Structures are given as structure tokens and as C-alpha cells.
């Protein structure tokens, strides 16, 4: 049967309230193996067992390594002295031959090789445990973060639902624009189409901007060519008006006919020469 959200949240909160500590988890195992273990008398701070941290655990580890190194040296020294004294004062005294030393050295070499292999296995096991511990710590942090986020989800969902109800209440009548009532896929298609059109317009605008300097130069050249033509046009208009005036005077009978015709021909000639840019 599927569990409800409240049950899941309650279970996660109960798990979060349980303090996880490798040292406390190991107390049950160590107590079961050594029920009558003596009280710890090391000078290492006991705060590491109450509030362990990576720094305190590393300090304890260094201390124990140094302590065990000293104890091993003292043990070997004491055992060697004891065996030597027993061999001397024994009755009869124990005599060790050279061959026995050779055999013992061979055995020592084999034992050291076996010990080296075991040390390598222990080092690999420790490294694997450290990696697994880091992975578990990372997973625990992720679970804690996800649990916090999960606990905030109901409030967020309620707030979104209230906002949705409020928006529905504000929208008294649907919009007359059909583009505003399209579903999401159709809206995305419209956005894609409009974006393509906008890209095409931007491309055309860039092309026009690139051709603008060339068009500007062409316009300047045309304006330079147009100025002489406008001057010629103005001269031709004046000549035509003068010729028309002379013709009208001739038609009305004013002045000498030959003089008026000459003046009219000269004005027409002048106008034509200016229009055609021909020197006299």
C-alpha cells in the first residue's frame, strides 16, 4: 500500500533526529567482544568520542600510531632481554648454533614478507573504507538537503494553488485575442516562427547597413552631376521665357520684326548652347 506524504515526512524526520556516529555504532560491537574491557586511560582527549570531528579523529590516530610504535619497541626490547637472560642463567645454558640462526633468519624473512602482504591488504581495506565513508557522508548530506526541500514543498504547493485561484478569479472574461489562448505546443511554434521572421529581418537590416555607405557615395556623385544640369535648366528656362516674350511682342506688332527675330534667335541659340554645353 502506498504511504502518504505525512508518513514519509515523519519517517524522514525521525531518521534525521538519530545522530549518526561511527564511534557510537562501534561501541556495541566492541562491548560485545570485550565485556570486561578496562577503562580508557590514554591522555588523548575524550571529546573526540563525545563530539567527533575529522581533526580530532586524525589527532587520535596519530597519537595511537606513535604510542603503538613505542609499545612495540619496548615489547621487543623486553622480550629479547628476557630470552637472553633465560638462555644464560638456564641449567644447562641454552646454546644457539649458527645453523639455527640461519634457519630463524629464513623464517623471519618469510614472516616479514607475509606481514608486508597483510599490511598492504589492511592499507587497501582502510582506503576502501575511507572512500566508502566519504561516499556515505556525501549521500547523507544530499538526503538531508532533499529532506529539507521536501518539507518545504507543501507550503510552496499551497502558495501556488492560492495564486492559481487568485488568477482565475481575476480573469473575469476570456481574451478575444486567439493568440493568448493557444496551448503550450502551439505557442512554442508561434514563438519559433516569429523568431525566424525576426532573424530574417535582422539579416536584411545588416545587409542594408553594409550597403548604406556605397549608396551614400552614389547619391553624392548624382548630386554633383545634378547641379550643372539644374543650372543649365534654369538658363534654358530663362531663355525660353525671353524667346516667348519676344515672340508675343512680334505677334502684337511691337518693334522691328527683324530685330525682334534676331533677339529671339540669339536667346534660343544661347539657351541651346548652355543646355548642350557647347562653346560659342
Image (cartoon, rainbow, N blue to C red):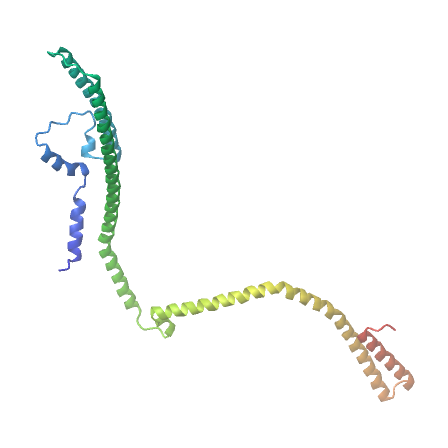
Q: Quadrant of the C terminus?
A: bottom right
Q: Is residue 144 left or right of residue 3?
A: right
Task: Give 240 or 253, whichever is nearer the viewer.
Answer: 240
**Residue at left offset 20%, top offset 18%:** 77
Side of 204 relative to 168 (left or right): right
Q: In percent of the image, x 82 and y 74: which residue is there?
A: 274
Relative to 160, residue 91 above or below: above
For residue 29, say whether it is visible: yes
Q: Nearer the viewer, residue 185 or 62?
A: 62
Residue 78: give x, y in percent of width and height.
18, 17
Q: Nearer the viewer, residue 208 or 29?
A: 29
- Of residues 136 and 103, the one nearer the viewer is 103
Quarter where residue 161 is shown: bottom left
Q: Residue furthest left?
A: 36
Residue 177 visible from this viewpoint: no
**Could you tell me which residue is drawn at 18 percent across and 34 percent down?**
50
* Residue 186 point in image, percent of width and height: 36, 71
Count of marks, rendered view: 0
- Residue 200: % across, % down: 50, 67
> The N terminus appears in which quarter of the rendering?
bottom left
The picture quadrant where one finds residue 239 is bottom right
Vertical placement of residue 38 versus 143, above or below: above
Report the residue at 24% width, 59% height from top.
157
Q: Is residue 34 above or below residue 240?
A: above
Q: Residue lying farthest front?
A: 99
Amino acid at each position: 500500500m502506498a504511504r502518504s506524504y505525512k508518513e514519509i515526512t515523519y519517517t524522514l524526520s525521525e531518521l534525521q533526529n538519530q545522530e549518526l556516529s561511527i564511534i557510537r555504532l562501534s561501541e556495541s560491537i566492541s562491548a560485545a567482544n570485550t565485556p570486561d574491557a578496562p577503562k580508557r586511560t590514554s591522555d588523548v582527549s575524550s571529546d573526540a568520542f563525545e563530539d567527533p570531528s575529522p581533526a580530532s579523529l586524525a589527532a587520535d590516530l596519530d597519537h595511537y600510531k606513535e604510542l603503538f610504535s613505542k609499545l612495540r619497541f619496548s615489547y621487543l626490547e623486553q622480550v629479547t632481554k628476557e630470552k637472553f637472560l633465560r638462555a644464560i642463567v638456564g641449567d644447562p645454558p641454552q646454546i644457539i648454533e649458527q645453523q639455527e640462526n640461519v634457519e630463524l633468519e629464513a623464517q623471519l624473512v618469510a614472516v616479514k614478507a607475509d606481514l608486508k602482504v597483510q599490511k598492504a591488504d589492511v592499507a587497501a581495506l582502510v582506503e576502501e573504507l575511507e572512500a566508502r565513508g566519504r561516499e556515505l557522508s556525501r549521500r547523507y548530506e544530499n538526503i538531508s538537503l532533499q529532506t529539507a526541500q521536501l518539507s518545504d514543498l507543501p507550503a510552496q504547493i499551497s502558495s501556488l494553488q492560492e495564486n492559481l485561484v487568485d488568477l482565475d478569479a481575476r480573469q473575469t472574461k476570456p481574451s478575444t485575442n486567439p493568440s493568448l489562448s493557444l496551448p503550450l505546443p502551439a505557442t512554442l511554434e508561434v514563438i519559433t516562427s516569429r523568431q525566424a521572421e525576426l532573424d530574417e529581418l535582422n539579416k536584411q537590416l545588416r545587409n542594408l547597413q553594409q550597403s548604406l555607405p556605397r549608396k551614400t557615395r552614389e547619391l553624392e556623385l548624382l548630386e554633383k552631376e545634378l547641379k550643372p544640369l539644374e543650372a543649365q535648366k534654369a538658363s534654358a528656362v530663362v531663355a525660353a521665357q525671353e524667346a516667348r516674350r519676344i515672340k508675343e511682342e512680334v505677334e502684337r506688332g511691337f518693334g522691328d520684326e527683324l530685330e525682334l527675330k534676331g533677339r529671339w534667335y540669339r536667346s534660343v541659340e544661347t539657351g541651346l548652347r548652355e543646355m548642350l554645353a557647347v562653346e560659342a
